[in-house]
Amino acid sequence: MYDAHELRDFQRVYIQEPQSTMEVEEEDPVSAELEAVNYLMWRRLQLSKAKLKGVTEMAALMAGFSVVATVELDISKTKNDYLLVAFTVTTAFLVSTTMFSILIATCLLPHIEAVTKLNSVNIARDSPHDDLIWYIDLAWFLANTVSICLFILDVVLLSWIKFETVPAICITSIMVPVLLLLCVFSLVFYRQTVHHQIDLADRRYDELRQMGKKLRIGISVLQELVKYIRQRDIPRCRQVCQKWNQVLIPRMRSEIQVKCLDQASFGKLTRLAKFLSVMESSHEIPFGNYLLLNLNMSDPLVEKFFTLCGLHIHTLRVQFMPNDIDICSLRELLLLRAPAVVNLSVEGQGIPESVSNHPSLFPQWSGYYLHCQGGVPTLPFLESIQFKTEEGQKCHPGFLLDLFRGAVNLRNLTFLKYSDPTYSIIILSALHHSGNYLQLKRIHMERLCESAFRILIAMSHDGMQLKEFSFQSLAEDVKSSSLEQLISCHKDTLESLYLNEVMGTKNLQIRLPSMKRLRKLTRSAICSSQIPFGPICYAKHLPNLEELSVFAFADELDWNEYFSETVNWIPCISLRKLELPINLKDLNRLRRLCKMFPSVTKVIVSSPADEIIPLMWELWPELEELHLSLTDGNSNIDSLFTGIPNQECGIINAGKTYGEVDIERIRIGPSIAYLRGLKKLNLEISPKDIFSSFCLQSTSCLPTDITGYFGLAYLSNLEELVITSSEISKECAVFLLSKFQKFANIRICDSDGRPIIKSNRIFC
């Protein structure tokens, strides 16, 4: 048992940190803008101080000269009286303007110098220079413009009084052009100064506008911030302010599902009536994702529920029991009470297959629907339709046709949980006859037959361009040419392709065309034969492939067809995510995969052999995400994760001498510590045969404190750690928590699946 001081000593001495690098702190843009504002204020303060000091020096010089000239002037009685009057008036004006300038400077300079001597930018606002800027500019203008002009005029008059006519004319002819030049210079100088101030003000206005955008936490920044908030904390975070509430409401409407049950209960704690009373007093409806289960449409509470929340329903998931609702009721539910629904999921045993309570299947459309097109009511916001039916259940073809006609902006179509291939014909025929398939981008079907492929090919020739296509299985009558033709029709638009199994013993083989936009390829073959498409060069045929999943047993794969070394001699550097085949045992095959896909950063591995695990640490040291599923068939996990021999692991665990271990001396193999850049680690451990036992037959497959102290503790960049079963102690878990980033999401469970520590720290 370690106390806090021993853990800190262990962390300092025995856990080796990566070599420290010089970290350059990133400048906060808001702080930089605030410093810029203080700098401008300090600059104006220093400029005002310099102006006032220049005023005092210039005014003192002018006033002193005028006084000395007046006192020392020897005037003869023969001089013209008008010249004497002009000289005395000019001198008086000169002395007055200079004295007034000196007065302003004398009054303001002490206040400004008192602030500047403190040498602090932050207290520049305490100076009166901004409030009295008009007086400073006036003193500057009198001392440097008016006084100079009066001084020149005074010199001209003095020359006519003191000297003869010829010298006076010479002095006048020199000083008058100088006076004119000074006036022109003053005008030009002040004009350019004003233009500079205007340009500076414009620049500062733009900078302040940008600063205002940064000071106001923008919606985009706030949207990134709220992504890290847990769902259970969203209601409390909504109370921060109106802006937080505005950003969080869309997330509430999309992520939090509200359950409406038949017993007038709403969730686990509140009743439907209580919920409706709260919604009535609410300013706006914060929920948009609802699950309707066995509701009686004639119930007044249900009617009230749709009246309050119907227009805000974004995602609607309806589960029906037998004879729960008929087609017309479901249609009116969608058109009248949930006209803004975007995602629709209908599932259960009571999918409307026939009409029970209406005389006609589709009565005349009325004019009170919110959205109509060509006289037909529509659901213009409906983009995704998903049907999950039980075995033997079907939807009425008329209802499907009507639903597809109303979904004028349909993007996604999913039909699951049916095994009858003729059902796909009914669905696709209704979609084809509706005409609303040109904007369809994603199709996910359970089982397809040859006739269904013909309908898909016909819609493709009419202009349908799919981005995602997947199926769970193919019927025995499907031809290779049909599947190949459908893929070829969408080779320029497909971004995700999921090829699953072929039912029966028939073995299809297709030629995969070059698809430059394909990002994700999944090939699955667990219960039946796979769909081979011959050796393929991933770098040439799929140059932008980012995810490759091979969901099949490694021993049953034709590796030369999937990963042919002769064809794939060019590495596929675009691949980032790779799901390895199940039960991978061959080390050479893993090395071949690493050579083919050297840029992989996310790996998913299920039930690998023990020798495969340490080889991954060595082959892919740049991994950022690792999802590893182990069974009780794996053993010596501590040794595989740390590189420490198994015997040494037993000795260390027995003596609990973690702080006395020289890890570099006893480590003999690769360790998970090699993955310095790993950000997410998900370790799942389950029984090898889950059908016969739900308990682990051996505990040697569970990581212990050795894995924690000498493996996981080195992953300083880890942001998410999930271990579903382990023998890690709480002390080790707390130690790991201190090693990872503050916002890391950590969940470590014991051998029974109970959490040892669960932390999702967002704000610390």
Image: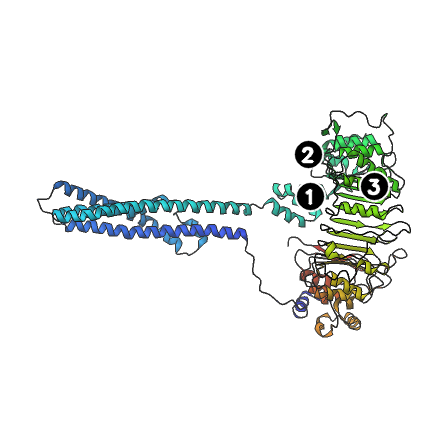
10 Å crowding of disc 2: few (<14), some (14-19), many (20+)? few
Mark sitting earlier along the chain (2/1): 1
**Residue 3 showing in the rendered view:** yes
Q: CA distance from mark 2 to mark 3?
A: 54 Å
Q: Estimate the x, y position of residue 204 in percent, counting from the top left.
A: 46, 47
Q: CA distance from mark 1 to mark 3?
A: 40 Å
| Residue 201 position in % (x across, y down) | 44, 45
Q: Dot 1 lies on which element? A: helix
| Image-quadrant location for residue 394 | top right
Q: Look at label 3 and name its amino acid.
A: Arg
Disc 2 designates what residue? 281
Q: Mark 1 or mark 3: which comes first in sequence?
A: 1
Q: Badge 1, how many Cα within 10 Å: few under 14, some, many 20+?
A: some
Horizontally, is 472 left or right of 162 in the view? Answer: right
Mark 2 lies on a secondary structure that is helix
Say if 714 sits above or below 317 in the image.
Answer: below
Res. 304 visible in picture: no
Query: Mark 2, mark 3: which one is toward the viewer?
Result: 3
Q: Position of residue 622 (x, y in %)?
A: 69, 62
Left or right of 38? Residue 631 is: right
Residue lying at the far bottom of the rendered structure: 665
**Which residue is disc 1 drawn over?**
251
Q: Amino acid at mark 2?
A: Ser
Residue at image point 71% right, 47% down: 232
Q: Measure how far apart labels 2 and 1 are at the Cα level.
A: 21 Å
Looking at the image, residue 275 lies above or below residue 188 = above
Q: Residue furthest left?
A: 78
Q: Quadrant of the N terminus?
A: bottom right
The residue where tag 3 is placed is 454
Colouring chosen for the image of the structure = rainbow
